[in-house]
Image (spheres, grey):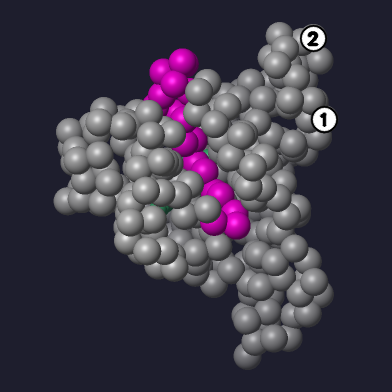
């Protein structure tokens, strides 16, 4: 029987990446085979190396496979063609080393905000009181103090999103996979959350893969921006941002505007192709 790369890695035959830290994606392809309708080729030949503690933004037109790539990295979809490793080990399923914030909120509807955040901390070696203090600190950080005992159905979309972010951040995983986490937030709250996320990343460096449609958000947050092509998603270009994130005037600088224009032009070309239904 021929093994694919993922299986060979699982079988210990694939040694080339064992010393590699961070997340490595190689020759990844993903075909959805819905029960009804034609198969959909979502990703084709995606190769990407994300360094340990690197902050990557993922941009690309709607439907180009960003969420699919994150599900695969998170281990929520099986890798059929190609390989994904985290710190040299093949990703074979979800794990506590990778915290995920999904595009569509995944709070437990029968648990309160506090219970949802505590759930993520259950496996941590903390005393009960410490767990609760940690959960409350993250709830406060995302601006949900006073809503600890609310159920998700009693929250707005943006509040649910913030509760899901608090739950994932509280676990302090080695890698954060975030799928449009600030998409439902108003501009003011979005800005606060961006600043907070950068502060957390500086305090407790971790690998971040952040999907967004907002070019300025990508330029503000990421060290490198991966621009994907229209479906089937391939990597079109990887842009190194290289701006001083600590500069309080950064977003008003001409370097920021130039970088945003450059990235925007790459994304716009792909969005036009996606709308025309023409793959590359
Ligand atoms: N379960 C599924 N079955 C069949 N096709 C799917 C499934 N999930 C996604 N797709 C298709 O795969 C492609 C990629 O979807 P994906 O959700 O990864 O895109 P995306 O880049 O995250 O889009 P958006 O920016 O709108 O969130 C789309 O064409 C979508 O229709
Ligand atoms: Mg998506």
What x and y, as percent, mark residue 191? 52, 21
Task: Identify the residue under disc 1.
Answer: 242
Q: Out of 224 and 68, give the one closest to the viewer.
A: 224
Task: Indicate yes or no: mark 1 CB to ligand 1 under 8 Å.
Answer: no
Answer whether residue 203 is visible to the viewer in this image: yes
Q: Going 45% across and 28% down the picture, which residue do you hit? A: 183
Q: Which image quadrant for residue 223? A: top right
The quarter holding residue 19 reads bottom right
In the image, residue 103 lies at what x, y percent?
Answer: 42, 41
Relative placement, left or right, of 47 versus 155 is right
- Residue 254 numbered mark, or none: 2
Density class for disc 1 (Cα within 10 Å; few <14, some 14-19, many ≥20) is few
Q: Quadrant of residue 238?
A: top right
The stretch of residues the image draws in magenta is 173-190
Above or below for 267 versus 137? above
Looking at the image, residue 267 lies above or below residue 153: above
Which residue is found at the position 78% from the left and 30% from the top?
241
């Amino acid at each position: 029987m021929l093994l694919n790369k993922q299986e060979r890695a699982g079988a210990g035959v694939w040694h080339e990446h064992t010393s590699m830290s961070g997340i490595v994606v190689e020759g990844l392809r993903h075909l959805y085979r819905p029960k009804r309708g034609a198969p959909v080729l979502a990703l084709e030949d995606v190769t990407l190396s994300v360094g340990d503690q690197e902050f990557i933004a993922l941009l690309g037109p709607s439907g180009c496979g960003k969420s699919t790539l994150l599900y695969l990295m998170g281990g929520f979809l099986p890798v059929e063609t190609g390989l994904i490793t985290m710190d040299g080990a093949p990703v074979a399923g979800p794990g506590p080393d990778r915290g995920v914030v999904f595009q569509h909120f995944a709070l437990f509807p029968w648990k309160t905000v506090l219970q949802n955040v505590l759930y993520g901390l259950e496996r941590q070696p903390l005393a009960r009181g410490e767990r609760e203090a940690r959960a409350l600190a993250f709830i406060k950080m995302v601006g949900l103090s006073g809503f600890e005992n609310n159920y998700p159905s009693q929250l707005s979309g943006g509040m649910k999103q913030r509760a899901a972010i608090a739950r994932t951040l509280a676990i302090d995983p080695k890698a954060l996979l975030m799928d449009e986490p600030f998409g439902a937030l108003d501009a003011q709250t979005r800005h606060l959350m961006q600043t907070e996320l950068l502060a957390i990343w500086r305090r407790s460096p971790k690998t971040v893969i952040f999907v967004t449609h907002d070019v300025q958000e990508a330029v503000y947050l990421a060290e490198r921006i991966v621009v994907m092509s229209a479906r089937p998603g391939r990597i079109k270009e990887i842009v190194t941002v290289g701006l001083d994130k600590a500069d309080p005037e950064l977003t008003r600088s001409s370097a920021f505007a130039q970088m945003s224009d450059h990235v925007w032009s790459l994304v716009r070309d792909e969005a036009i192709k996606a709308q025309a239904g023409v793959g590359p």
